[in-house]
Image: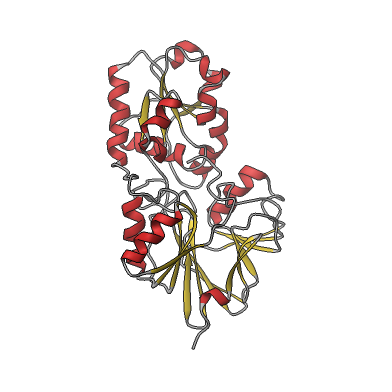
């Protein structure tokens, strides 16, 4: 009999550790060997000796933290390629979260474990879509692991933004969006919907948008918001980190329509408390229905939950007669959604 995955894939203070391969997945502290699922800072941390990731994730890490901090030694592994690490066969497959995001598929002594990292199932023109993989253990996130979280169509939310822009043509529409993944996705969806005017960017978004274009994701006419005067921004579309919208930078905009794109905008009180006039429910994480659908598609008899609303998802698995347990990994979900 092959050993149960819990005997070779273990939770440690540094994170999830594969003993026979001698590597960690998205470790919380600097380690000798790390596989990184994607470039968000709660998963991609600096200082590892050797880093394995997709070429896109490595490029994102270098852009965000610098060449050396992104890994003393860096090894790119394209989607679908199999790499043998000691006795463990490792494959990266798309997770649909952001550009370069990957699930880590590990095969060891006739057992297959898939670590999802963060993922979503809704369409995104800026990254490869999630690919379900049959496995013995599926290790999933549960950021939106409650039935209340039902993400609407992202195209419908973009249409809402464009209706507001048409209704208030003199007002600047400033959209709070995270700098990696969310902002590029919004720009690409606006372009798909026919919005071809210049889009103005907060400085925090500029480098990653430029990197996306270098990596083959067209985003159209982008301009720095800080270099524009109030007259230029009148009636324009501006993207900025959510934290910047209410600060001095945001107050320089005249009578703005303040929007925010996040799965958390499903909670009206949260949007109201943040002063959001136009909440856009656009998430880069799977909602409740997509979490359950994904679990079923993997056909895994056992589910491990890394972070988020673990208990609700574990209860749902029990009702489907699937074993499930919480790993309670601390440190994930710290970046804004």
Q: Residue furthest bottom?
A: 1
User: Can the viewer see residue 199?
Assistant: no
Reply above or below: 255 against 285. Answer: above
In x, y percent, where is residue 256? 42, 17
Reply above or below: 186 against 50. Answer: above
Reply above or below: 135 against 52. Answer: below
Q: Please tell me how many numbered marks the rendered image carries.
A: 0
In x, y percent, where is residue 322? 36, 69
Whether residue 327 sits left or right of residue 170 in the image: it is right
Using the image as rendered, state which of residue 131 and residue 143 is in the foreground: 143
User: Can the viewer see residue 253?
Assistant: yes
- Residue at image point 55% right, 52% down: 57
- Residue at image point 36% right, 64% down: 317
In x, y percent, where is residue 36? 58, 58
- Residue at image point 69% right, 49% down: 67
In x, y percent, where is residue 169? 32, 16
- Residue at image point 31% right, 45% down: 150
Reply above or below: 68 against 314. Answer: above
Q: How is the model colour-coded?
A: secondary structure
Using the rendered view, name the quadrant where residue 243 is placed.
top right
Using the rendered view, name the quadrant where residue 296 is placed.
bottom left
């Amino acid at each position: 009999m092959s050993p149960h995955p819990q005997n070779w894939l273990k939770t440690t203070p540094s994170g999830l550790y594969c003993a026979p391969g001698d590597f960690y997945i998205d470790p919380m502290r600097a380690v000798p060997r790390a596989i990184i699922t994607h470039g968000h800072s709660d998963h991609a941390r600096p200082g590892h000796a050797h880093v394995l990731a997709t070429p896109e994730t490595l490029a994102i890490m270098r852009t965000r933290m610098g060449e050396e901090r992104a890994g003393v030694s860096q090894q790119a592994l394209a989607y679908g390629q199999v790499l043998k690490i000691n006795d463990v066969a490792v494959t990266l497959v798309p997770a649909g979260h952001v550009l370069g995001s990957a699930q880590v598929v590990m095969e060891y002594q006739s057992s297959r474990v898939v670590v999802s990292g963060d993922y979503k199932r809704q369409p995104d023109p800026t990254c490869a879509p999630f690919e379900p993989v049959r496995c013995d253990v599926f290790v999933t996130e549960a950021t939106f692991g409650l039935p209340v979280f039902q993400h609407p169509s992202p195209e419908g939310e973009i249409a809402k933004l464009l209706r507001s822009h048409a209704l208030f043509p003199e007002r600047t529409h400033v959209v709070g969006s995270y700098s990696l993944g969310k902002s590029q996705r919004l720009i690409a969806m606006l372009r798909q919907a026919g919005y071809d005017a210049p889009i103005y960017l907060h400085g925090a978004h500029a480098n990653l948008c430029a990197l996306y274009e270098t990596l083959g994701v067209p985003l159209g006419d982008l301009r720095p918001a800080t270099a524009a005067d109030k007259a230029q921004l009148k009636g324009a579309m501006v993207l900025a980190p959510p934290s910047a919208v209410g600060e001095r930078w945001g107050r320089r905009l005249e009578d703005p329509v303040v929007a925010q794109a996040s799965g958390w905008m499903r909670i009206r009180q949260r949007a109201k408390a943040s002063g959001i006039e136009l909440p856009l429910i656009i998430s880069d994480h799977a909602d409740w229905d997509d979490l359950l659908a994904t679990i079923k598609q993997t056909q895994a008899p056992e589910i491990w939950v890394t972070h988020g609303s673990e208990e609700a998802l574990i209860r749902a698995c029990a009702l489907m007669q699937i074993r499930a347990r919480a790993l309670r990994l601390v440190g994930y979900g710290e970046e804004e959604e």
